[in-house]
Amino acid sequence: MHAGKLVFAQLMEHLPLRTFHQCVARYSGRYPTLKFSHLDPFLCMAFAQLAYRESLRAHQAKLYHLGIRGNIAKSTLADANEQRDCRIYMDFAMSLIQTARKLYASDSFAVELEQTVYALDTTTIDLCLSVFPWARFRSTKAAVKMHTLLDLRGNIPTFIHISDGKMHEVNVLDILIPEAGSFYIMDRGFTDFARWYTMHQAQAFFVTRAKSNLLFRRVYSRSVDKSTGLRCDQTIALTAPKASKDYPQHLRRIKFYDAEHDKHLVFLTNNFDLPALTIAQLYRCRWQVELFFKWIKQHLRIKRFYGTTENAVKTQIWIAISVYVLVAIVKKRLNTEASLYTILQILSLTLFEKTPIDQLVKIPMCK
């Protein structure tokens, strides 16, 4: 089936092209597509991101075998990114996300829970102010922010909002629609008691770090096993006037000692049913969203955006997200135990090989 096909071509065979064409049709426009279709910039950017390359110029002779038509100049790619509606690639990314979530729905992760657990975080993507003046962040700096909700079953991004650099991360809670029964893991940057109470009323659970200046009174204390690292498990009431008005019900405060890093961590949650140690373990899973940001930033070619408009930047970000999710889909379809990030590393080194992908992902990286 894969005889003679390059690894990149094998990977792209998993793209649902019918869905892609539906996304293109949804945002019709006058684009020159005979020589450079809507799919061509997607394939170019996908290759550049997976291979961690700045340019396709050195590989022009192999472009046909990669599934990319014609000679691709940087200006051609930049024009495509600027002129073709970024919502095409956003909708396609979201369709891939839906597929991936179904594939990973029954997977377990570090904490045994039936409920869906999300990690919510924001990363800032720095830009050059002189090149991207529309993205002014500070007086001498430009940036966009990517607000992401990561489903920890499969580490699949389920909600992404790309904003200008001035939007504070806590404001994304106004856009997010909480799912009843699900857990949302957040860091202290999302501290807002009124917004937390909205989540609580939606019957969603949150787990976050408490700020050091939190004003509260203890209502009740539960016994804890200090050998596990737990130091206290309390029911508290907020005492600061505004905070107590914004969140009028009790919260749960859990203190945990992280011996590995010699740190005392204090968690807040509105869930009173799970064991205190499980709450602490849930928060530790939040680092998965940081791995996702790390990959996205490493492979976005931040200093070499193809196109300088807001549409071009968003197009490139959405294609990077699509590539990440596509690899997650392929991982599940190949039924491999290799981690998603291991597979991404393998692909970055083998895109021009003709070995079947299912054999590649079984080869140890330390070979």
Image (spheres, helix red, strand yellow):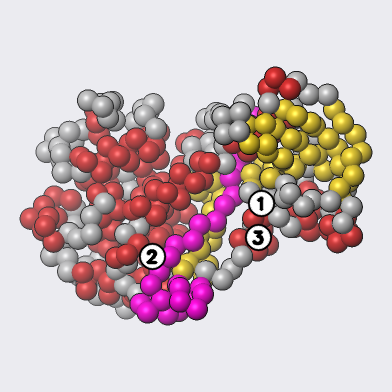
Q: Please give the name of the residue rendered at 54% of the width and 39% of the height, measured from the top-left corner.
A: 152
In the rendered view, does 13 fall on the left or right side of 249?
A: left
Image check: 104 left or right of 115? left
Q: Which residues are magenta?
A: 113-142
Residue that numbered label 3 is attached to: 170
Q: Position of residue 108 (x, y in %)?
A: 55, 28
**Type of amino acid under label 1:** Arg
Q: For label 1, count other residues whose C-alpha is less than 10 Å away and answer few (under 14), some (14-19) or many (20+).
A: few
* Residue 281 picture quarter: top right
Q: Give the label, 1 or 3, closer to the camera.
A: 1
* Residue denoted by label 2: 315
For the question of whether residue 102 can be seen, the reply is no
152 on left or right of 333? right
Which residue is label 1 attached to?
Answer: 188
300, 95: nearer the viewer: 300
- Compared to residue 6, the image places residue 121 above or below, namely below
The percent position of residue 77, horizontal first and vertical second, equals: 25, 68
Q: Which quadrant, please, contains the N terminus?
A: top left
Disc with the residue nearer the chain's start (1 vs 3): 3
**Depicted 326 relative to depicted 297: above or below:** above
Residue occupying image coordinates x 18% and y 51%: 66
Of mark 3 and mark 2, the one earlier in the sequence is: 3
What distance separates the C-alpha of mark 1 from that of mark 3?
A: 10 Å
Choose between 257 and 43: the one closer to the eye: 257
The crowding category of the residue bearing disc 2, from other C-alpha atoms within 10 Å (few below 14, some 14 to 19, many at least 20), is many
Q: Name the residue: 86% across, 42% down.
A: 236
The three-letter amino acid code for the residue at tag 3 is Val
